[in-house]
Structure formats: C-alpha cells, structure tokens
Image (cartoon, grey):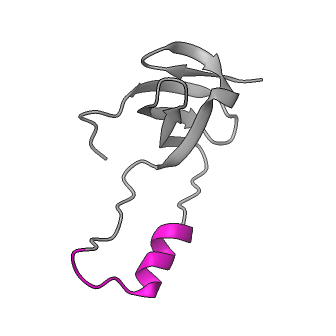
C-alpha cells in the first residue's frame, strides 16, 4: 500500500485516489472543428516520462483535484498541492 498526500485531507491510502491526467495537457478547442487525429492524440498520447513527473489526481472522498509530484521510476511521492491557481 502506498500513501498519497491530499493537500486538503492529509495522507490517505492510494485506493482513495483517481489519476486525472498529465499536468499541462490541453484539451482541443471544441469551438471550432477538431479532427479525428487531434482527438486521438489528446486521448491516447501520453508523455510517459521517466523520473520526476507532475500529474493531476483526484481524491475521491473530498472530490478535490490536486497536483501530485512523484518519481515515476521509484514511485516516491515528492509532494502535492492544490490545483487551483496552478500553471503548467
């Protein structure tokens, strides 16, 4: 079992969290035409970086989104902070 630090509720069991995506990944602008290729890249292409990563996670019990920084090789958690006001 791994503990993740929710910035709102403190450390909790990893089963309480849901991965929401890579920080900085932008959804295509649907105000105009979006090609199938653009949607495909958005939905299925991941950076999948090795080492220090910044990701968006949701703590399901409180429903808050936050940024989790971790090492993708060792799974060590570096820190977390509220998503509000965050820039990529």
From the viewer's perspective, is residue 40 above or below residue 15? below
Q: Residue at x 28, y 37 (%)?
A: 86
Q: Does the magenta stretch include residue 32?
A: yes
Where, by quadrant of the figure, is residue 45 drawn? bottom right
Q: Residue at x 58, y 27 (%)?
A: 77
Q: Residue furthest top?
A: 10
Q: Is residue 36 magenta?
A: yes
Q: Where is residue 15 in the image (x, y as percent from the top left)?
A: 69, 29
From the viewer's perspective, is residue 47 above or below residue 83? below
Residue 63 left/right relative to 77:
left
Q: Position of residue 67 (x, y in %)?
A: 43, 34
Of the pair 29 and 50, the residue shown nearer to us: 29
Q: Residue at x 70, y 35 (%)?
A: 74
Residue 42 left/right relative to 46:
left
Q: Looking at the rendering, in which quadrant would you find the N terminus?
A: top right
Number of marks in the rendered image: 0
Specify the principal SS of the magenta part.
Answer: helix
Q: Residue furthest right?
A: 1
Of the pair 15 and 61, the residue shown nearer to us: 61
Q: Position of residue 25 (x, y in %)?
A: 39, 58
Q: Residue at x 51, y 46 (%)?
A: 20
From the viewer's perspective, is residue 21 above or below residue 77? below
Magenta part of the chain? 31-44
Q: Where is residue 33 in the image (x, y as percent from the top left)?
A: 28, 85
Residue 78 left/right relative to 3:
left
């Amino acid at each position: 079992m791994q503990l993740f630090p929710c910035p709102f509720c403190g450390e909790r069991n990893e089963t309480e969290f849901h991965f929401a995506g890579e920080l900085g990944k932008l959804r295509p602008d649907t105000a105009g035409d979006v090609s199938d290729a653009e949607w495909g890249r958005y939905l299925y292409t991941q950076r999948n970086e090795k080492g220090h990563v910044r990701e968006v996670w949701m703590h399901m019990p409180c429903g808050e989104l936050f940024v989790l920084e971790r090492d993708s090789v060792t799974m060590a958690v570096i820190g977390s902070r509220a998503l509000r006001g965050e820039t990529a």
